[in-house]
Image (cartoon, rainbow, N blue to C red):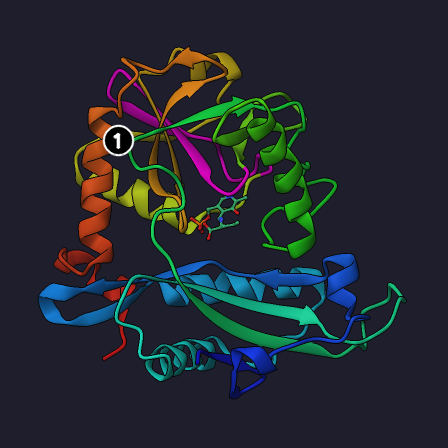
Amino acid sequence: MRYVWINGKLVSENEATVPILTHALHYGTSVFEGIRAYWNPENNNLFIFRAKEHYIRFHNSAKIMGIKVNYSIDELVDATVELLRANEVHEDVYIRPIAFVSASTVNLDIRNLDVSTAIITVPFGHYLEPKGIRAKVVSWLRVHNSMFPMKAKVGGIYVNSVIALMDAKASGFDEAILLNRDGYVAEGSGENVFIVKDGVLYTPPTYDSILEGITRDSVINIARDLGFTVIEKRITREELYTADEVFFTGTAAEVTPVINIDGKIIGNGEPGSITLKVRSYYMDVVHGRVSKYKNWLTPIY
Ligand SMILES: CCC[C@H](NCc1c(COP(=O)(O)O)cnc(C)c1O)C(=O)O
């Protein structure tokens, strides 16, 4: 039996249900996070990766959406540790915190409506093929931050991601890349994008209708540690095609090479050498093998 933490209590997963008129079910009025905890057999421990940063973003998302989360960042980190221990997790796991408007009403004014906060854990391996994936630049654009608070990880915004991913899959690709309203590269349906050209890494700026990814931030630090230059700049569609390497970053995606975009081979069609170097270092960091980043890890046992 697996526990879920909801509103301060551990309940069995099959008890953690919601009524059919739950506001968030109808209108996407929720904010959520995606966090990973990695099992490290060398020291028989489980480490949550950048829990604090995720819960800071969680709180910011809620504030932007006007959803009240009644738990502090430290209380949420502690609740996650308690939940992972209660579920006796000894494997890589995906953690899904969510704060959602739980009131049963069809009204749109959520100011005084009840909100529930829950944390769920699911065993989790690879989200995308680590050997490299094929991506399509889809016709659906990334919602522009003048239309929707793109820094907030809001449930409802993921319809934009879902329809983009379905478009890519329908054409035989693995993932979608979305351009923003101005025609520049924004991000994947659930990942940030990096390109490598002549040994320099580039990634779209955070003001260009993208989620400010925590993995993106980690990879920028890691790449610079490895001696690479990382520049945040607008990337055009053509620059994707002519890049030496392209990769996605995300909690679920980790660091995933993109080896084909719109049918065009990227680089030599294999995962790029810089991509692999960055991924290898990232995996060492999340498993607690790099002392410089130990402060990014929360041990469970
Ligand atoms: C289905 C959503 C999955 C979720 N996507 C995370 C995500 C990212 C990367 O952000 P971070 O590095 O902070 O994870 C970028 N952009 C979008 C639209 C995302 O959904 C994840 O857990 O990776």
Is any part of residue 7 visible from this angle? Answer: yes
| Quarter assignment of residue 47 | bottom left
| Neighbours of disc 1 within 10 Å: few (<14), some (14-19), many (20+) | many
Name the foreground residue: 78 vs 89: 89
In the image, is residue 179 part of the stretch drawn in magenta? no
Determine whether, in the image, residue 291 is placed left or right of residue 209.
left
| Quarter assignment of residue 257 | top left
Locate residue 30, reporting x and y percent.
67, 63
Question: Which residue is located at x 58 percent, y 49 percent?
Answer: 151
* Quadrant location, the N terminus: bottom left
Question: Which residue is located at x 30 percent, y 16 percent?
Answer: 269
Locate residue 62, reporting x and y percent.
63, 65
Q: Residue furthest bottom?
A: 9
Question: Which residue is located at x 68 percent, y 36 percent?
Answer: 144
Determine whether, in the image, residue 6 is placed left or right of residue 73.
right
The residue under label 1 is 275
Chain part drawn in magenta:
189-209
Locate residue 108, reporting x and y percent.
87, 63
Is 82 drawn above or below residue 155 in the view shown? below
Locate residue 89, reporting x and y percent.
31, 73
In the image, is residue 208 part of the stretch drawn in magenta? yes
Is 271 drawn above or below residue 6 in the view shown? above
Name the foreground residue: 182 vs 118: 118
Is 226 drawn above or below residue 27 in the view shown? above
Question: Which residue is located at x 48 percent, y 22 percent?
Answer: 235
Determine whether, in the image, residue 58 is placed left or right of residue 112.
left
Q: Residue furthest left?
A: 42
Is any part of residue 179 visible from this angle? Answer: no
Picture mark count: 1
Q: Amino acid at mark 1?
A: Thr
Name the foreground residue: 83 vs 148: 83
SS class, disc 1: helix
